[in-house]
Image (tube, rainbow, N blue to C red):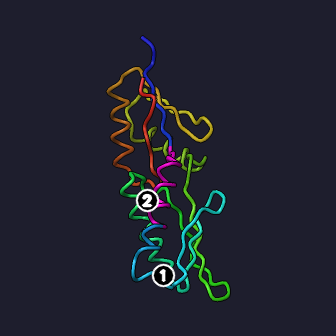
Amino acid sequence: MADSSFDIVSKVDKQEADNALNQARKEVEQRYDFKGTGSDIQWSGESILITANAEERAKAVLDVFQSKLIKRGISLKSLESGEPTVSGKEVKLVSTLKDGISQENAKKIGKIIRDEGPKGVKSQIQGDELRVSSKSRDDLQEVIRLLKAADLDIDLQFINFR
């Protein structure tokens, strides 16, 4: 019998992220407490740029954006926010959406699978994802349970379960 396998990935649905950003922008434009503060949120290449006239306002816009991401099913582990920086009269806050599993995190996940997972389960790094294979599907499901319970700083999805 052939080995069963699945892939571990960390991907963000760009369309859902764009929808969340547009919803956050609309809410910031509409809300009374943001009127006249120059608060804005927009794409800046691959990152998200938040501008406001005060550090608290920038953090409040980030909070609105985070709530929209959660409603759209995107984990906050995928969002990496920097510290607010003052430039002139406005405060800028740059955030990025992490996509893919870094080599460092892939090695951590592989170590967890080797150390705590069932015997006979193999994992291999393939670019920005991990393939896990075993003869037993039950062992693969045990690995999924193990990784969901592990406290990792990235959002994991399990795809291509064969």
Residue ID at (39%, 81%): 32
Q: Secondary structure at mark 1?
A: helix
Is 152 magenta? The answer is no
Residue ID at (48%, 44%): 109
Residue projecting furthest to the top: 1
Q: Secondary structure at mark 2?
A: helix
Q: Quadrant of the N terminus?
A: top left
Give the quarter of the image for residue 87. Answer: bottom right
Question: Residue 7: x, y in percent?
Answer: 48, 33
Residue ID at (62%, 80%): 85
Question: Which of 50/83 is in front?
Answer: 50
Question: Residue 34: x, y in percent?
Answer: 45, 81
Q: Amino acid at mark 1?
A: Arg
Q: Amino acid at mark 2?
A: Leu
Residue ID at (50%, 85%): 36
Is 20 magenta? The answer is yes
Question: Residue 159: x, y in percent?
Answer: 44, 33
- Looking at the image, do the residues carrying marks 1 and 2 touch, with CB atoms under 8 Å apart? no
For label 1, the crowd category at 10 Å Cα-Cα, with few meaning under 14, some 14 to 19 and many 20 or more, is many
Q: Which residue is mark 1?
A: 57
Give the quarter of the image for residue 51. Answer: bottom right
For label 2, the crowd category at 10 Å Cα-Cα, with few meaning under 14, some 14 to 19 and many 20 or more, is some
Q: Quadrant of the C terminus?
A: top left
Distance in Å between CA atoms under marks 1 and 2: 20 Å
The span picked out in magenta is 10-25
Relative vertical location of residue 119 with respect to residue 29 in this rendering, above or below? above
Precedes in sequence: disc 1 or disc 2: 1
Q: Viewer-nearest of labels 1 and 2? A: 1
Question: Residue 128: x, y in percent?
Answer: 59, 41
Residue projecting furthest to the bottom: 89
Give the quarter of the image for residue 2. Answer: top left
Q: Which residue is mark 2?
A: 76
